[in-house]
Protein backbone atom coordinates (compact mmCIF):
# COMPACT_ATOMS: atom_id res chain seq x y z
CA UNK A 1 0.00 0.00 0.00
CA UNK A 2 1.21 3.49 -0.81
CA UNK A 3 1.73 5.94 2.04
CA UNK A 4 -0.18 9.20 1.94
CA UNK A 5 1.85 12.39 1.74
CA UNK A 6 -0.98 14.23 3.49
CA UNK A 7 -1.09 14.01 7.28
CA UNK A 8 -4.38 15.84 7.93
CA UNK A 9 -7.36 17.26 6.09
CA UNK A 10 -5.88 20.73 6.59
CA UNK A 11 -2.98 19.79 4.29
CA UNK A 12 -5.30 19.11 1.35
CA UNK A 13 -5.72 21.65 -1.46
CA UNK A 14 -9.12 23.17 -2.18
CA UNK A 15 -9.67 20.74 -5.09
CA UNK A 16 -8.17 17.27 -5.50
CA UNK A 17 -7.35 15.68 -8.84
CA UNK A 18 -7.01 11.93 -9.48
CA UNK A 19 -3.33 11.88 -8.49
CA UNK A 20 -4.09 13.57 -5.18
CA UNK A 21 -7.04 11.28 -4.45
CA UNK A 22 -4.74 8.30 -5.04
CA UNK A 23 -2.09 9.76 -2.72
CA UNK A 24 -4.55 10.58 0.06
CA UNK A 25 -6.23 7.18 -0.02
CA UNK A 26 -3.02 5.24 -0.65
CA UNK A 27 -4.39 3.58 -3.78
CA UNK A 28 -3.31 3.34 -7.40
CA UNK A 29 -4.13 6.05 -9.92
CA UNK A 30 -6.43 3.62 -11.75
CA UNK A 31 -8.41 3.04 -8.55
CA UNK A 32 -8.65 6.81 -8.07
CA UNK A 33 -10.08 7.16 -11.60
CA UNK A 34 -12.59 4.41 -10.85
CA UNK A 35 -13.73 6.42 -7.82
CA UNK A 36 -13.91 9.65 -9.82
CA UNK A 37 -16.22 7.90 -12.29
CA UNK A 38 -18.40 6.36 -9.57
CA UNK A 39 -21.78 8.17 -9.38
CA UNK A 40 -21.69 8.12 -5.55
CA UNK A 41 -18.30 9.90 -5.43
CA UNK A 42 -18.44 13.74 -5.26
CA UNK A 43 -16.71 14.46 -8.56
CA UNK A 44 -16.97 17.90 -10.14
CA UNK A 45 -16.46 17.97 -13.89
CA UNK A 46 -14.91 21.10 -15.34
CA UNK A 47 -14.81 20.52 -19.07
CA UNK A 48 -12.91 17.26 -19.47
CA UNK A 49 -11.19 17.66 -16.10
CA UNK A 50 -12.40 15.83 -13.00
CA UNK A 51 -11.74 17.25 -9.54
CA UNK A 52 -13.14 16.71 -6.06
CA UNK A 53 -13.88 19.64 -3.75
CA UNK A 54 -11.95 19.21 -0.50
CA UNK A 55 -15.01 19.55 1.75
CA UNK A 56 -17.03 17.02 -0.29
CA UNK A 57 -14.09 14.59 -0.23
CA UNK A 58 -13.84 14.88 3.56
CA UNK A 59 -17.58 14.22 3.95
CA UNK A 60 -17.33 11.22 1.61
CA UNK A 61 -14.31 9.81 3.48
CA UNK A 62 -15.97 10.23 6.87
CA UNK A 63 -19.12 8.57 5.54
CA UNK A 64 -17.09 5.62 4.25
CA UNK A 65 -15.36 5.20 7.61
CA UNK A 66 -18.51 5.47 9.70
CA UNK A 67 -17.65 9.04 10.73
CA UNK A 68 -14.19 8.25 12.13
CA UNK A 69 -11.70 11.09 11.71
Image (cartoon, grey):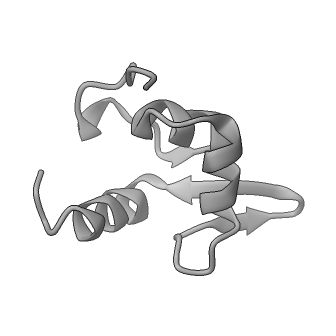
Residue 11 spot, x, y in % from top left: 32, 29
The location of residue 54, given as percent across then percent down, is 42, 52
Q: Give the answer, above or below, for where 26 lies relative to 2.
A: below
At 62% from the left and 80% from the top, the residue drawn is 39
Quadrant where the N terminus sits is: top left
Q: How many marks?
A: 0
* Left or right of 26 in this view: 52: right
Point 51% across, 37% down: residue: 27
- Compared to residue 64, the image places residue 17 above or below, namely above
Question: In the rendered image of this protein, does residue 66 appear above or below residue 34?
Answer: below
- The image position of residue 37, as x and y in percent, is 70, 67
Query: Could you say which is closer to the camera, residue 35 or residue 60?
Result: 35
Question: On the picture, is 35 further left or further right than 64?
Answer: right
Q: Quadrant of residue 46?
A: bottom right
User: Outermost residue toward the front?
Assistant: 1
Q: Residue at x 73, y 56 (%)?
A: 50
Nearer to me, 69 or 65: 65
From the top left corner, tell me how far across and down residue 8 is, in percent. 23, 33
- Corner quadrant of residue 18: top right
Above or below residue 63? Residue 69 is: above
Query: Which residue is more in the foreground, 11 or 4?
Result: 4
Amino acid sequence: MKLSVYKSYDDLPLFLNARMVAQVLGVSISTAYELLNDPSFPTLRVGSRMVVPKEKFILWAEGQSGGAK
